[in-house]
Amino acid sequence: MAITIAVVNQKGGVAKTTTSINLSAALGSKGKKVLLVDLDPQGNATTGCGMGRKFNTTVFDIITGTVFYSEAVLETPFNNMSIIPATTELADSEVFFRKVTTDTPKTMFLRQALAAAKSEYDYIIIDCLPSLGTLALNGVTAADSVLIPMQCEPYSLDGLKELLATIRRVRGSHNPYLSILGIVFTMTDMRLNINRAVRQKILDNFPDLIFNSEIPRNIRIAEAPGHGKPIMYYDPSSPGATGYDSLADEVVTRTTTT
């Protein structure tokens, strides 16, 4: 039975999509069967896996109930890793949610669409858009746990508190067993005083949530999406590849002991 993880942070530019892609690839390299769900209208998780931009079916189609989830699944070139792609069409989901008149709560559509996928994969990774709107809440409601990428920079702590409040609301509505898998620091550069100070403040406030693995600021990670590859396939010896490989090990440990 798949463990579904929503990679979420309402703040943009924190390596959320990068983490979704590279965690999925790293888990796949360890023999785990992974489905990556691109839930961002920008479609960067899709293009970052080298899948292009034109598809017959996308995540929008499974949310609206037009197709069964498996009809939108594409195999990637990477070991044990599939993807449900997204395009800019997904931006129309907010219009869909406003107009829908079924008894199903608006935040439950993705959870229902992916229910049958749970028996087919080891992990389902949902790359949520940088928002706390209805579409992003669909991603969180569909998840068993939340992984939060975070930069060590000012205002990160305020954004984290807002996100944790949202998670509590989701628990109180339609997903009472939702857990926080952890916070992973991304684009770290501990030569900078501000990075060290913010990191320590977050550690002081949430000591039990922080992954030991950290993702360093690394130009090779930034280059990899342009080549349509996860970092471990683009430059397996880079510090970024090592960081995501270590994070995947921690994710496996945390999800098999909880």
Image: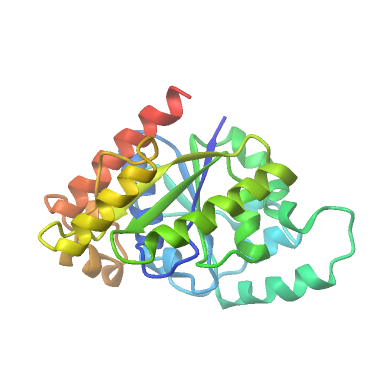
**In this picture, residue 47 sits left or right of residue 143:** left
Q: Position of residue 69 (x, y in %)?
A: 65, 51
Q: Where on the picture, by quarter, is residue 176? A: top right
- Position of 88 relative to 210 (above/below): below
Q: Position of residue 169 (x, y in %)?
A: 67, 49
Residue toward you, 158 or 9: 158
User: For the point 30% across and 51% down, which residue is it?
Assistant: 201
Q: Position of residue 153 (x, y in %)?
A: 29, 64
Q: Where on the picture, by quarter, is residue 87? A: bottom right
Q: How is the image coloured?
A: rainbow
Q: Assign the N terminus to one quadrant of the image.
A: top right
The reply to whether residue 11 is visible in this rendering is yes
**In this picture, residue 143 sits left or right of residue 155:** right
Residue toward you, 236 or 213: 213
The reply to whether residue 114 is visible in this rendering is no
Q: Position of residue 193 (x, y in %)?
A: 15, 62
**In this picture, residue 95 sits left or right of residue 10:** right
User: For the point 50% across and 64% down, which residue is it?
Assistant: 10
Residue toward you, 212 or 97: 212
Give the mark count.
Answer: 0
Q: Residue furthest top?
A: 257
- Position of 17 relative to 33 (above/below): below
